[in-house]
Amino acid sequence: MAISFSAVLLLGIVLVVLIRGGSLKAGPAVVAVLFGFFLAFTGMADDIQRFLDSIADMINSISF
C-alpha cells in the first residue's frame, strides 16, 4: 500500500514537472492519466502490481 501510494505521488510529480516544463502538453497528459485509470480495471492490473512489487523488493534487498 505504501509503495503504491509513493509511486502515484512520484508519477504525479513527474507529470506536473513535464507539463510545466513544456515537454508534455495537457491533452496527452490527460490521455495518459485516463489510460492508467482504465488500465487499473483490466485483468493486467494484478500482473502489473506483482511486477512493481518485485522491483520494489529487489531495490529493497540491495545493501549499501
Image (cartoon, rainbow, N blue to C red):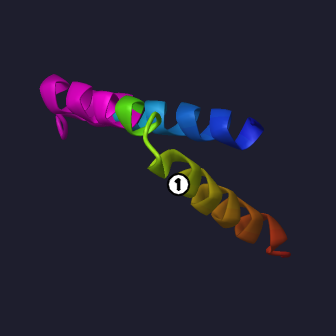
Image quadrant occupied by the N terminus? top right
Amino acid bearing label 1: Ile
Residue tagged 1 = 48
Quarter of the image holding residue 27?
A: top left
Q: Crowding near pointer 1: few (<14 within 10 Å), some, many (20+)? A: few
Q: Residue at x 47, y 47 (%)?
A: 43
Image side of residue 22 versus residue 61, left or right:
left
Q: Residue at x 60, y 57 (%)?
A: 52
Name, please, the residue furthest toward the front: 43
Quarter of the image holding residue 10?
A: top right
Residue 2 screen position, x and y as percent: 76, 37
Q: Residue at x 46, y 32 (%)?
A: 13
Asked if 64 appears above or below 1 in the picture, the reply is below
Residue 30 screen position, x and y as percent: 24, 25
Image quadrant occupied by the C terminus? bottom right
Residue 37 screen position, x and y as percent: 40, 29
Q: Residue at x 70, y 43 (%)?
A: 3
Q: Nearer the viewer, residue 42 or 59?
A: 42
Asked if residue 34 lies in the magenta stretch, the reply is yes
Q: Nearer the viewer, residue 62 or 46?
A: 46
Q: Which residues are magenta?
A: 16-36
Image side of residue 34 versus residue 59, left or right:
left
What secondary structure is the stretch in magenta mostly built from?
helix
Residue 28 screen position, x and y as percent: 16, 33
Q: Nearer the viewer, residue 48 or 21?
A: 48
- Helix, strand, or loop for circle 1? helix
